[in-house]
Image (cartoon, rainbow, N blue to C red):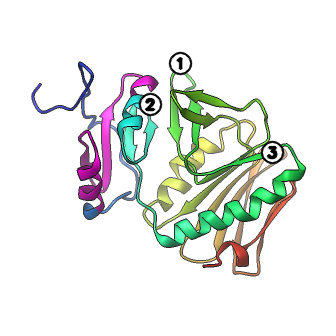
């Protein structure tokens, strides 16, 4: 088939049958900017820049290594990630600076946005891969690494910094997948435009949701002894 991107000698088919997210990841301008940087082609539909159907995790790792930007890998399809703005970046830096020192008194470790989260498929031997904005892992055996691609599978806490164009995904598909992790204790969604945080907490085998609004609020993660003042988290 002419015009298809290739990985080695194999044709990588563009997948057009997957359901699209509820809100767009990218603008048209962002698509053209990223496509100009990429060594392989993407299609762009309804705000989603999605790449190739991969036959295996190994294909994903190889293509991700070649790409100048990151992709999440869901149901065998690579989805290009949205570019982040100044507010997102500032909150991410503050989050690491505020949480990391508090973990020194326990065996937990924090991972930033370059660390993948691996979610094994319930059937078959494959897995999905996401890039949360940050994770806290308290299991010292929770380490995975293939071809210089590192991941976690059993985090205790997951953080996502939410923008308008990722809100539906972070609170929808990703929330459903993350809350299915057996050892997860909290999923924290931090709005990038205002002091507004939503926390899903595991309590007595179920989940409760807590919302914090205003700079006077405090994110509390009592199981690992972490507290994050929103005033400091949102400091520019």
First of labels 2, 1 by sequence position: 2
**x%, y% of residue 233?**
68, 72
Q: Residue at x 54, y 66 (%)?
A: 89
Mark earlier in primary sequence (1, 3): 3
The residue at the point 58 percent across, 54 percent down is 133
Of 141 and 147, nearer the camera is 147
Tell whether 110 sits left or right of 8: right
For the record, the magenta segment spans: 30-59
Task: Decide which of 205, 179 is in the foreground and name it.
Answer: 179
Q: Quadrant of residue 155?
A: top right
Q: How dense is the environment of label 2, judged by Cα within 10 Å: few (below 14), some, or many (20 and up)? A: some
Task: Write down the residue under mark 2.
Answer: 61
Question: Is residue 223 something that shows in the picture?
Answer: no
- Verify whether residue 120 appears in magenta: no
Residue 43 picture location, percent across and down = 24, 45
Quarter of the image that includes the C terminus: bottom right
Few, some or many residues within 10 Å of mark 1 (<14, 14–19, 20+): few
**Residues marked 2 and 3 touching at CB (< 8 Å):** no
Instruction: Tell me the residue that label 1 is attached to.
Output: 125
Asked whether 66 or 217 is in front, the reply is 66
Dot 3: within a 10 Å radius of its alpha carbon, few (fewer than 14), some, or many (20 or more) residues? some
Residue on which disc 3 sits: 108
Alpha-carbon span between mark 1 and mark 3: 28 Å
- Please identify the quarter of the rendering in which residue 192 is found: bottom right
**Earlier sequence position, callout 2 versus callout 3:** 2
Position of residue 227 measured from the top left corner of the image (x, y, whole percent):
82, 65
Q: Residue at x 79, y 36 (%)?
A: 139
- Mark toward the viewer: 2 or 1: 2
Could you give the CA–CA distance between mark 2 and mark 1, rounded to whole angstroms?
A: 16 Å
SS state under label 3: loop
């Amino acid at each position: 088939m002419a015009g298809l991107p290739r990985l080695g000698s194999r044709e990588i088919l563009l997948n057009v049958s997957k359901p699209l997210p509820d809100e767009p990841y990218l603008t048209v301008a962002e698509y053209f900017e990223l496509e100009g940087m990429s060594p392989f082609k993407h299609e762009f539909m309804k705000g989603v820049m999605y790449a190739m159907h991969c036959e295996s995790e190994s294909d994903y790792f190889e293509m991700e290594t070649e790409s100048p930007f990151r992709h999440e890998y869901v149901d065998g399809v690579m989805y290009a990630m949205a570019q982040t703005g100044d507010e997102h970046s500032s909150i991410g830096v503050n989050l690491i600076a505020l949480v990391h020192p508090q973990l020194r008194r326990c065996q937990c470790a924090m991972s930033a946005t370059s660390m993948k989260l691996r979610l094994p498929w319930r059937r078959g031997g494959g897995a999905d891969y996401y890039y949360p904005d940050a994770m806290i892992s308290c299991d010292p055996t929770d380490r995975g690494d293939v071809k210089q691609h590192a991941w976690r599978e059993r985090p205790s806490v997951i953080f996502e910094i939410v923008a308008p164009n990722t809100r539906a995904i972070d609170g929808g598909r990703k929330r459903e997948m993350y809350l299915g992790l057996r050892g997860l204790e909290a999923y924290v969604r931090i709005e990038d435009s205002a002091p507004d945080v939503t926390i899903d907490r595991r309590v007595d085998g179920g989940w409760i949701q807590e919302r914090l609004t205003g700079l006077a609020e405090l994110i509390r993660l009592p199981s690992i002894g972490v507290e994050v003042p929103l005033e400091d988290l949102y400091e520019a």
